[in-house]
Amino acid sequence: MKKIICLLTALCLLATAAAALAEYSYEGTVEAGETLPVLAGFGGKVSGLTLRAGDLVAEGETLATIGTTLNYAPIEGTVTGLYIAEGDKAEDVTERYGASLNIEPTNRYTITATTDKAYNSSETHYVHLGERVYLKCTQDGSHRGTGMVSVLTEKGYQVEVTGGDFYMGEKVNIYRDSGYSKNSCVGQGTVDRTKPVAVKGSGSVMKIHINNGDFVERGELLFETVEGVLDGLYAPGNQVLSPVSGIISSVDKKNGENIAKGDTLMKILPTDSLQVVFEIQESDLFVLQEGMKVRTELYWETEAGRSYEGEITAISHLSETAQENSTEKKTFKVYASITPDERIRAGMTVVVYVDAGEKEATSEGE
């Protein structure tokens, strides 16, 4: 009798130990806890987009480039009155100052003229836009130069001085003949300062390529703008950088496509949001608890001995069964943390082992 009692005692101890080491296993998947949209901070044409859904990206990696509008110097001259700064909206600056910047032309003088003092002939009273003329001061003829008829007005015309030195306010006669013959005189005018040329631009200033006082050639790049208002009036550059490390879940724009500020360029599943999701039977709701330790193995290498440690972070309070009157057994989702490495991919099938401590396993949870 004593032997039987001892045997029963040993079996009870073994059962107790087995219960203490109860481990539940479930099949689950790796899913992302959030999807992060990458939004365009400004508008323009998309280029440099080579990534696809499923690609890995690192934080700070270039995802695409958004094209800018290039603003060039319309004339040769010196930059003056550089009012814009990177991040500014060009239209706001122009409204305040009349321009984004000004360029003082290399040709510093402009002559406002009429044909009143022209030689008395029909030909000399009719000047043409763009024609070359010769200039000579009326006082003693010592100041001479060349010019081009640049503007026709209701009362006369204007000549842009292309060569020679004159005094401001000086009177000059204007000729068609380089020999200053009397019968080629087409009028008389007064020397004035050439007005700076206003460069306005539109959109937000992304990058400025010149400084105040710089000499620029005609056609030289002055500044770049983009569509929309830059957040905080800060110009981050026209490359779109990944805000996090993760997996691209979708690419929503194509190269050559125009994008507006706030449009979604692509979506990323952040690496640090990856988790394991599995379903449990209704009967296991009172066995598993938040905070319990879990061990995750990849479904296709459960014999390799490599696993990922984590814990249960949440248990759903809503049944996954579609119909209330369904005869199927109710299941509930469980979420567990995982520290992923380069082998973990979103959507992978995994086996999750839960250490239930002293709780007894049910037949359906085993």
Image: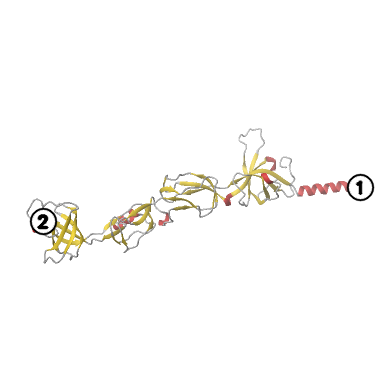
Residue 145, located in which quarter of the rendered image?
bottom left
Mark carried by residue 3: 1
* The one of 11 and 233 positioned closer to us in this rendering: 233
Residue 191: x, y in percent? 17, 62
Check disc 2 and report its element: helix, strand or loop.
Answer: helix
Check disc 1 and report its element: helix, strand or loop.
Answer: helix
Amino acid of disc 1: Lys
* The one of 266 and 157 positioned closer to us in this rendering: 157
Mark carried by residue 171: none
Q: Is residue 6 left or right of residue 58?
A: right
Residue beneath label 2, please?
184
Residue 154: x, y in percent? 15, 51
Amino acid of disc 2: Ser
Q: Gap in Å between the C-alphas at discs 1 and 2?
A: 141 Å
**Dot 2 alpha-carbon crowd within 10 angstroms: few under 14, some 14 to 19, many 20 or more:** many
**Dot 1 alpha-carbon crowd within 10 angstroms: few under 14, some 14 to 19, many 20 or more:** few
